[in-house]
Amino acid sequence: MLANMLRFDIITIFPDFFREAIDYGIIRRRHHVVDDRPFGGGDGMILKPEPLFAGVEALTGQSNRNDYQVGTRVILLSAQGRVFSQAFAQDLSESAVQVILLCGRYEGVDERVSEALATDEVSIGDYVLSGGEPAAMVVIDAVVRLLPGALGSETSALNESFSEGQLDHPQYTRPPDFRGMKVPEVLLSGNHAEIELWRKEAALAKTRRNRPDLLK
Ligand code: SAH
């Protein structure tokens, strides 16, 4: 099978955020002013559309989401977006060829970026970050580990948390007795049918305890 290549581009005013995590190159462009005051009044500054349009145009040759090549996704990280999920990560890992992540800052991004450039507006959860950079890192991490060859075993993504509407089962390793806390006997039994059954029940119990919403 051909490995599917997936290219990520990040448009950010703080590229150093990614220095440790990602091997990267920078397209430097001089936009002396990247932010401005909101029309209609209010606190803080808004990222201007020009630098983001210029960045996407430089990467795709296009300035409207209807004109990108098939497989190009332009993701605006935003607290107002649809909440990121394992299903969305799976979709990107299977169908995207190029993912461009747009990171907001300050009070957010001029809405014309969402209207014209973004194929997806994505939030990583119901809280407000000071910038889109950590959210971009989350999206990249969740997608990359699903790419063929990224995991230790090709099947290990199949029974993880969220892949079947519930959480993964608890895991134990050596020692079997740690400070009096014992590994469940059944896991040491070598009885695969019983182990499977225990894992199913333990996963369900944990989902019920920590994430009852997943079971509705
Ligand atoms: N005023 C905005 C928040 C701006 S926070 C609001 O209330 O909706 C500044 C930037 O951080 C945003 O433009 C976005 O890129 C990023 N950000 C904040 N929270 C985020 C979240 N939950 N998911 C993804 N990106 C987020």
Image (cartoon, grey):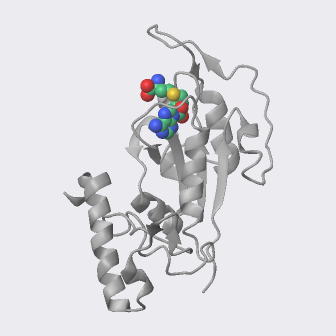
At horizontal 39% and vertical 37% (from top left) the residue drawn is 126
Q: Is residue 73 visible?
A: yes
Residue 169 % position (x, y): 38, 69
Quadrant of the rendered structure where residue 202 is?
Answer: bottom left
Residue 114 % position (x, y): 47, 36
Question: Which of 3 and 33 lies nearest the eye of the viewer?
Answer: 3
Direction from residue 107 to residue 167 in the image, left or right: left
Residue 138 versus residue 155 in the image, above or below: above
Question: Which of 94 and 189 lies nearest the eye of the viewer?
Answer: 189
At horizontal 39% and vertical 67% (from top left) the residue drawn is 168
- On-image quarter of the N terminus: bottom right
Check the image and name the residue furthest to the left. 216
Question: Which of 215 and 136 lies nearest the eye of the viewer?
Answer: 215
Q: How many numbered circles are shown?
A: 0
Residue 41 versus residue 80 in the image, above or below: above
At horizontal 59% and vertical 55% (from top left) the residue drawn is 140
